[in-house]
Image (spheres, rainbow, N blue to C red):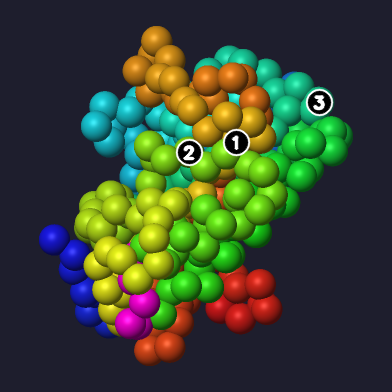
Amino acid sequence: MITIKSDREIELLRIAGNIVYQTHQYLKNYIKPGVTTKELNDLAEKFILEHDAYPSFKGFEGFPSAICASINHEVVHGIPSNTKLKNGDIIKIDIGACYKGYHGDSAWSYPVGDIDDDKKYLLYHTEQSLYKGLEQIKPGNRIGDIGYAIESYAKEHNLGVVKELVGHGVGTSVHEDPDVPNYGIKNTGPKIKKGMVLAIEPMLNFGSPNIVVCEDEWTIESEDYSPSAHFEHTVVVTDDGYEILTGVLLNGKK
């Protein structure tokens, strides 16, 4: 069931989203060659707890860590470990924080040291695809409009859209209705209404869109080992558009 959030709920979601945003800003200073993904996980968990929240992902459906940390061809759900980052890697950090029962959720892809032009291309255009999807969020549009915009942009730039993994509603659960695919047909799916809170999260591969699940039953990789990028914001639908709860708009407005 798709829920419309009250003003009180939106304020709590705004605080949760801001904690996620702050955690990303804090953590990115530590993303460099030689650091382990477990070290990043521990830093993020401590930061979230210090801000009167707890990590949404820890224990969610059995996930063992506070953040997801996915390197290069790992698409999502990488489990932090003693693996050290290397110069030229890209890492996807997915962070959730729960504040007084309400969640924020945002993923971002970061370069480690100096990355090659292909990875720069992938990161730039995956981030741009996120904002293309967000442009479709306003009352009266439909969920399919978001996916259509993301998929069209990805195809235009020859990037593979991972179709098995989707965005979603956010509220008292980190994953709520509706699903928000990164592909779609215009004017299809549920209507977008003021007060809906949605996580939009394109996951694009530099090569094939096909994915496989690893032996740990969590980490998802690109089938052809091509690099993958992931960008995600949680937003609330407003009278005439949306407000990003996990960051700032491109024009600098909150």
Label 2 secondary element:
loop
Q: Which residue is at the front of the view, 99 or 211?
A: 211
Q: Residues within 10 Å of mark 2 (few under 14, many from 20)?
A: many
Q: Is residue 73 left or right of residue 194?
A: right
Task: Pick out the residue farthest to the top.
Answer: 215
Total label count?
A: 3
Q: Disc 1 residue type? A: Asn
Q: Is residue 170 above or below residue 88?
A: below
Left or right, 197 with respect to 26, comes to left
Dot 2 and dot 3 residues touching (CB under 8 Å):
no
Mark 1, mark 3: which one is toward the viewer?
A: 1
Check whether the beta carbons of the residues at disc 1 and disc 3 lie within 8 A of each other: no
Tag shown at residue 162? 2
Please identify the dominant SS of the magenta region.
loop
Viewer-proximal residue among 223 and 114: 223
Label 1, secondary structure: give it: strand
Q: Is residue 177 above or below residue 224?
A: below
Residue 87 has which mark? Answer: 3
Q: Secondary structure at mark 3?
A: loop
Residue 244 visible in image: no
Q: Which residue is mark 1?
A: 205
Nearest to N terminus: mark 2 or mark 3: 3
Q: Residue at x 70, y 23 (%)?
A: 85
Q: Tag 3 or tag 1, which sits nearer the N-term?
A: 3
**Which circle's residue, 1 or 2, is located before the other in the chain?**
2
Residue at screen point 69% across, 49% down: 157
The image quadrant that residue 249 belongs to is: bottom right
Q: Which residues are magenta?
A: 139-143
Residue plotted at (34% across, 35% down)? 58
Q: Does residue 114 show up magenta in the picture?
A: no
Return the residue nearer the eye: 235 or 12: 235
